[in-house]
């Protein structure tokens, strides 16, 4: 409900009294009540202050309360004390209920609004669980935040990794793995070395996605089959039927589910049309109120704004023009800590503020403006999230990583991109999850927190309908469908789940393994090993490009055959073929130990044809051509065509190039993002598993050690045993140059270091958890 300026004070007091009584009776379950409270606090802060102390008690936000000042507050204090006595934690009533359900049941699925304290609940669980833990997240973008948070709250003898490895055995008493559904499968081959007691499926609404939802359900069922005694917790925001997770995956043993509607943060909603902002209520049909520019007010008051935009708008840099008015408000940052983060990021991506490595991301960050999306390298996202958490970001332009639960504090969420994919239920759910990022609750005592949501006037009706109507999950999984009706590329995983025919050692299905063995693909492996290895060593990328074009094309064709043989179809689409072809040089660069920024630089040289430029300039210096001819030839050079990275297989992929042929279309940041996508989406997630399965089967048949070498190169980017172990311990290949000389011994049991006195503070921080 909107409260207008110049309301009668006695009316407002009566309204506040009634709302507080209602919260006392039913809890803070009415979003309309919280909207009204936010409105009164904004327009009548002095009046609101008289109620704020009691409100925190009535809302159950006990971590924000001070000593009680009334009888009712004293009664709530007794409730708070009883929760602390029963759980040992300063939980809210909602957190206490969730904690109890998790303890008393083997499987618990729940739904709660964002800002309900789920993160604190999970941190508390991780601090007391004695066994190993697997946390499954829908997005790589969430992993950085989780790792940073968890490593701060657990002792050094707890191993925290963003992939599954059994390492540092002598020094750890338990492990916490934080992975996406695609990488969680790695847990099954090493179950004998683990003692998994808890599996957390956070943002479990991923189950509604088309293909990834099927992978998620497959993982859930495999976890129940192979790890039946582990507790399993499913957390969702704003879902009205969390029991759907149990129904769709046939989970029946000691189960429980609950819907929590208690809110802890208020929201105020605004429309924007042209330069006009209006305050409106999505819950009641009342007149809108014209107000000042909410965005400018926020920036002028040292607040922060998070803008939800499309990835296309970030990639095309269209957002720079659309939001120019607000970008211009941001001056260069002066804070020394912020500049340190800036310099680290600049060094990592190899970008600059000028020249042919000009990075718009760096130019904006220098002014307290950041970008955030899923195609940023994990290390890059860590730095950006550290920058935001430090309070240095004034504006953040982000994509659907917001929907997936990124916990970054901002005062305003501005929804510029109103395109939501999937069913109407999924669109409603994604919208609610997105606006939940506005006004994250703080730890400030006796303070009611609220945030702002801004949308376009043209989207108002759709917005209100999606916000008010319930969001449900389907109770039928794609894995339960008739396999004949499934897409061809999905049939193997459905069949393996239905028949329990996964090969955990090879990480493929038994039908895929048999398809490999029945083919003649070992001839392709033999050809690749012959061409890529000389005297037992992998050739360099430079030597690869010295191979005649006809033979290089044959190598690519053999790689294609090795990859395709595990599929039910015999051929890739033209778009799939170009992506596979473009990934091979990057695979070779990576296996030579090139750092991320070196791979980006090598790819830039190829795309911009820098070798041809150098050749033209050399001919001019030698007097072979005139200056005019040099200018003509340089002007005729165009950008090499390179396809945008996509996960494979993908029958529906379009053959889209990263840049147009004009040299002016080159953007360094796009190259950074796309290179990471190639390394992660294409090489690590798409190609690595099936190709390594073929190589391992080839080794079993031939005992050729080069097959295992190539498998290690593809999996780890190296065959050096020290470097492989460092990767398994969670270090990056970018750290090898300074880190390898500091290693005395390393294996699955522990790392011992030497000569570390000279290390910088940043480098010591990276290794201190293993000291």
Image: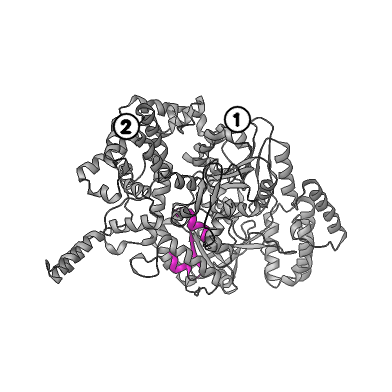
Determine if the magenta segment contains residue 94.
no
Query: Quick check: 365 above or below 477?
Result: below
Location of mark 1 (residue): 250
Query: Quick check: 368 above or below 385?
Result: below
Residue 570 disc label: 2
Is residue 83 something that shows in the picture? yes
From the viewer's side, name the closer residue of 651 and 676: 676
Quadrant that contains the N terminus:
bottom right
Residue drawn 57% across and 54% down? 145
What is the span of residues highlighted in magenta in the rendered image?
A: 361-383
Residue drawn 85% across and 63% down? 69
Kind of element beneath mark 1: loop
Spot occupied by residue 232 in the image (x, y as percentages of width and height): 63, 38
Image-quadrant location for residue 749? top right
Determine if the magenta segment contains residue 370.
yes
Spot occupied by residue 477 in the image (x, y as percentages of width and height): 53, 34
Image-quadrant location for residue 219? top right
């Amino acid at each position: 409900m909107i409260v207008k300026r110049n309301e009668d004070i006695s009316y407002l007091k009566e309204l506040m009294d009634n709302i507080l009584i209602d919260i006392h009776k039913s809890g803070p379950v009415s979003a309309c009540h919280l909207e009204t409270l936010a409105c009164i606090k904004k327009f009548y802060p002095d009046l609101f202050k008289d109620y704020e102390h009691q409100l925190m008690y009535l809302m159950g936000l006990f971590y924000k309360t001070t000593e009680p000042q009334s009888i009712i507050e004293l009664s709530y204090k007794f409730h708070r004390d009883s929760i602390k006595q029963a759980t040992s934690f300063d939980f809210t009533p909602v957190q206490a209920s969730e904690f109890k359900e998790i303890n008393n049941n083997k499987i618990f699925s729940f739904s709660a609004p964002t800002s309900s304290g789920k993160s604190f609940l999970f941190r508390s669980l991780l601090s007391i669980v004695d066994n190993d833990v697997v946390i499954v997240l829908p997005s790589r973008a969430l992993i950085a935040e989780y790792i940073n948070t968890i490593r701060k709250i657990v002792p050094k003898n707890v191993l925290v990794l963003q992939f599954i490895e059994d390492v540092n055995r002598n020094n750890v008493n338990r492990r916490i793995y934080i992975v996406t559904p695609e990488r969680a499968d790695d847990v099954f081959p090493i179950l004998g070395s683990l003692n998994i007691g808890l599996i957390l499926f956070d943002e479990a609404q991923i189950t509604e996605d088309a293909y990834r939802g099927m992978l998620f359900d497959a993982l859930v069922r495999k976890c129940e089959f192979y790890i039946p005694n582990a507790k399993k917790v499913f957390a969702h925001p704003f879902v009205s039927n969390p029991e759907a997770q149990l129904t769709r995956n046939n989970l029946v043993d000691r189960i429980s589910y609950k819907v929590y509607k208690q809110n802890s943060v208020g929201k105020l909603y605004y429309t924007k049309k042209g330069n006009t902002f209006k305050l409106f209520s999505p819950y009641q049909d009342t007149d809108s109120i014209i107000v000042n520019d909410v965005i400018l007010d926020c920036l002028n008051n040292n607040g922060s704004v998070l803008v939800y935009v499309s990835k296309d708008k970030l990639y095309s840099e269209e957002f720079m023009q659309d939001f120019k008015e607000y970008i211009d408000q941001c001056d260069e940052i002066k804070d020394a800590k912020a500049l340190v983060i800036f310099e680290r990021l600049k060094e990592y991506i190899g970008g600059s503020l000028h020249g042919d490595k000009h990075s718009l991301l760096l130019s904006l960050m220098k002014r307290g403006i950041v970008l955030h999306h899923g195609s940023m390298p994990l290390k890059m996202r860590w730095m950006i999230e550290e920058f935001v958490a430090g309070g240095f970001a004034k504006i953040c332009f982000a994509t659907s990583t917001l929907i997936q639960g990124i916990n970054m504090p901002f005062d305003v969420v501005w929804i510029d991109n109103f395109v939501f994919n999937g069913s109407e239920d999924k669109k409603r759910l994604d919208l609610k999850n997105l606006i939940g990022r506005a006004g994250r609750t703080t730890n400030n005592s006796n303070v009611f927190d609220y945030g702002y949501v801004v949308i376009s006037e043209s989207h108002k009706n759709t917005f209100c309908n999606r916000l008010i109507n319930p969001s449900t999950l389907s109770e039928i999984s794609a894995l339960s469908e008739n396999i004949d009706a499934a897409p061809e590329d999905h049939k193997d995983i459905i069949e393996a789940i239905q028949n329990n025919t996964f090969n955990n050692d090879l990480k493929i299905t038994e039908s895929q393994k048999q398809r490999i063995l029945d083919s003649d693909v070992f001839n392709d492996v033999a050809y690749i090993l012959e061409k890529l290895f000389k005297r037992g060593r992998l050739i360099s990328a430079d030597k690869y490009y010295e191979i005649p074009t006809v033979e290089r094309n044959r190598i690519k064709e053999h790689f294609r055959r090795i990859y395709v043989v595990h599929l039910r179809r015999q051929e890739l689409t033209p778009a799939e073929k170009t992506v596979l072809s473009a990934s091979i040089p990057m695979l070779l660069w990576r296996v030579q130990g090139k750092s991320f920024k070196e791979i980006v630089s090598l790819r830039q040289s190829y795309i911009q044809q820098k070798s041809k430029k150098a050749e033209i300039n050399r001919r001019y210096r030698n007097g072979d051509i005139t200056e005019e001819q040099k200018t003509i030839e340089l002007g005729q050079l165009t950008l090499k065509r390179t396809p945008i990275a996509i996960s494979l297989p993908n029958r529906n992929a379009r053959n889209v190039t990263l840049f147009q042929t004009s040299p002016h279309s080159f953007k360094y940041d796009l190259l950074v993002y796309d290179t990471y996508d190639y390394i992660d989406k294409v090489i690590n997630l798409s190609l690595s598993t099936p190709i390594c399965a073929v190589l391992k089967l080839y080794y079993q048949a031939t005992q050729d050690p080069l097959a295992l070498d190539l498998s290690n190169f593809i999996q780890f980017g190296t065959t050096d045993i020290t470097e492989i172990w460092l990767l398994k311990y969670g270090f990056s290949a970018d750290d090898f140059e300074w880190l390898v000389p500091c290693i005395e011994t390393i294996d699955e049991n522990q790392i011992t270091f030497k000569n570390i006195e000279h290390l910088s503070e940043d480098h010591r921080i990276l290794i201190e958890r293993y000291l």
